[in-house]
Every structure is written in C-alpha cells, then in structure tokens.
Amino acid sequence: MESLNEESEDILIRGCIEWDRQAQNRLYNLFSAQMFAVCFKYSSSREEAEDTFHEGFMKVFENIKNYKKAGPLGAWIRRIMVNTAIEKYRKNSHMIVVVSIDDNQNEPSNYFSNNVLSRMETEDLMLLIQKLPPQYKMVFNLYEFEGLKHHEIAKKLRISEGTSKSNLSRARAILQQAVKENMKEWEQAV
C-alpha cells in the first residue's frame, strides 16, 4: 500500500471533499484491499461484504469533510467500515435469535492462549470465524479485533452487556470445537 505524507494526504482529502473523481479513485485504491478485509470479517458472505464495503466508501466520501486528523486516515476509514457493518447487522438482527446466559458463565477464557490456535494458520482461523452465526461473529470481532469492552459492544449493538458476554463465550466455544475438529483432521492427514 502506498503511503501518504501529510502534504499529499491534505491534497487528497481536499480533492475528495471537492468530489474530484481522481482523488476519490486514489483514496479508494489506497485503502480498498485493507477495508474490504475489514468488511469481510463482519459479513456472512462475499456479497454482503461487497455491499458493506461500497456503502462504507460512500460514507467516507460523504463525510471526509468531517475528518479532523485526530488519528490516521486509515483508522478513520476503518471506523466507518466497522460502523457500517454494525448498522447492517442491526437492520438484520431482528431475524437473529440472541441468547443470553447468566453472567457468571460469561467470564473470558484463555481461549487465544491455547496451543492449538498457535499452530493454526491465520487464514484457517479467519475461515472458522467467518462461519460463526452473525450475532456471535459480530461480538467476537468487536471484542477480539477492535478491542471493545462488553459495555461498548452492548451500546453499539443495542443488546445487554450480559448478552455480549454470552455471545462471546458461545463464539469461543464454537471456535474451540471447530479448531479441535480441524486439528484432528490435520493430524490424521499427516
């Protein structure tokens, strides 16, 4: 990915504010691969990821005048993509059954310190995460990849904090089982 110095970033942003197609195309090309990966992480299919990605970039172009340089441009764009994915999730969440269990069963485990996971390829793990039910995948990604706390996730997704914790716990259990199954297959093949 091409990097921008402060001056070229300012020129690029100014061009995007003015709806200059070349500037928009350059910004798109600079961040498209990275941002599509973000959208895919939060989507159930490639088509859904593409929809989120395109909708997210439209929001970037519409709101770039509000970019305050409080952080890197890429982080600002990523936040828009994640928020767009959350909005899509909320629109569809009325069709998803959300399960809540008692808080004492929701304590985080040492799931990622598990030796099995350290032996897996990142790509394989991402494929397993992609197969999680939407409500579990959303909470898992927000917690593990975005670093949000349960109260923040609950607020963003408009669910209870207990539901956020239980969805994370369930996602981890599903992933742990899938990893074990994949490791058995891998060991048998070797």
Image (cartoon, rainbow, N blue to C red):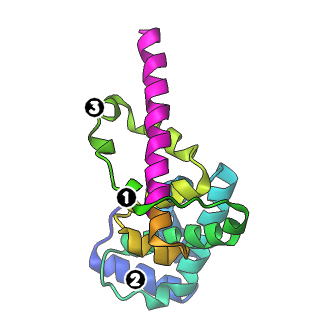
Q: Is residue 188 magenta?
A: yes
Q: Residue 1, can we see it?
A: no
Residue 179, percent from left and from top: 44, 31
Query: Which disc number belongs to residue 11?
Result: 2
Give the residue at x 53% y 61%. Answer: 100
Viewer-proximal residue among 79 and 73: 79
Of pointers 1 and 3, the one earlier in the residue sequence? 1
Q: What distance separates the C-alpha of mark 3 from that of mark 2?
A: 48 Å
Q: Is residue 180 above or below residue 64?
A: above
Q: Quadrant of residue 106?
A: bottom left
Labelled pair 1, 2 in contact (Cβ < 8 Å): no
Q: Quadrant of the C terminus?
A: top left
Magenta stretch, residue numbers: 165-190
Residue 113, percent from left and from top: 26, 41
Q: Quadrant of residue 2?
A: bottom left
Give the residue at x 56% y 47%. Answer: 132
User: Which label sits in the foreground, 1 or 2?
Assistant: 1
Please, what is the three-letter code of the amino acid marked with disc 3? Asn
User: Which label sits in the foreground, 1 or 3?
Assistant: 1
Please, what is the three-letter code of the amino acid marked with disc 2? Ile
Q: Residue 152, can we see it?
A: yes
Query: Which disc number belongs to residue 180?
Result: none
Q: Which residue is under mark 3? A: 115
Q: Residues within 10 Å of mark 2 (few under 14, many from 20)?
A: few
Give the residue at x 51% y 88%. Answer: 17
Of pointers 3 and 2, the one earlier in the residue sequence? 2
Q: Which residue is under mark 1? A: 104
Residue 86, percent from left and from top: 56, 70
Q: Quadrant of the N terminus?
A: bottom left
Judge left or right: residue 141 versus residue 51: left
Give the residue at x 34% y 64%. Answer: 147
Viewer-proximal residue among 8 and 43: 43
